[in-house]
Amino acid sequence: MTVINLKVNGKKISKDVSDNTILSDFLREKLSLTGTHVGCDTSQCGACVVHMNGNSIKSCTTLTLDCSGSEITTIEGLANNGKLHPMQEAFQKKHGLQCGFCTPGMVMSAIDLLQKNKNPNEKEIRDWLEGNICRCTGYQNIVAAVKEAATKM
């Protein structure tokens, strides 16, 4: 066991973790942040995307120890005083979700895109989200949600 110190959703965390603890497991099991979903355990589906120091990462293949000293933001850390993040609002408004399983990862990836490209076109959005799989929506409403959020972020 090793003590890890990091900031998760703005709160300082100090916990003992095993050397082989995966970040998604740490978030879900040790911190009860179950919004980070695990669909594949192989970095294929993107349901586990979180931000580490502002960049999107797939938490199902990231060792928690490699995050020491970092700032982690999960889907639970986006709302501010009960107000949804503009990307969450856009997903709701544009019906960018159905079953909701992929939604946390999609939202986190899309926010990262807009932090790097303020006004992406449809192709750029689709290319960026290529690592996130949705089996319900056909992506059209997800792309519309990202475009909507781009006007608000």
Image (cartoon, rainbow, N blue to C red):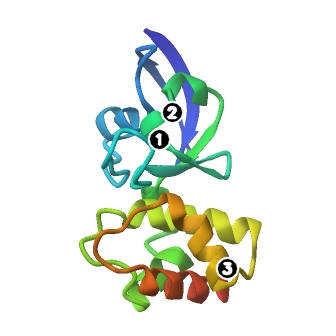
Q: Looking at the image, which is closer to me, 66 or 138? A: 138
Residue 30 visible in the displayed image? yes
Position in image of residue 129 (x %, y %): 54, 66
The answer to whether residue 139 is left or right of residue 85 is: left
> Which residue corresponds to mark 2?
62
User: Can you say whether 118 is above or below 20 in the image?
Assistant: below
Position in image of residue 14 (x %, y %): 50, 25
Q: Amino acid at mark 1?
A: Ser
Disc 1 to disc 2: CB gap under 8 Å: yes
Bin the neighbour count of mark 2 within 10 Å (Cα to Cα): few under 14, some 14-19, many 20 and up: some
> Which residue corresponds to mark 1?
59
Residue drawn at (38%, 51%) of the image: 36
User: Mark number for residue 35?
Assistant: none
User: Can you say whether 11 is above or below 97 in the image?
Assistant: above
Which sits earlier in the primary sequence, circle 2 or circle 3?
A: 2
> Which residue corresponds to mark 3?
153
Q: Amino acid at mark 3?
A: Met
Which of label 2 and label 3 is nearer to you? 2
Q: Amino acid at mark 2?
A: Thr
Considering every residue shown, the one lying at the far top of the view is: 1
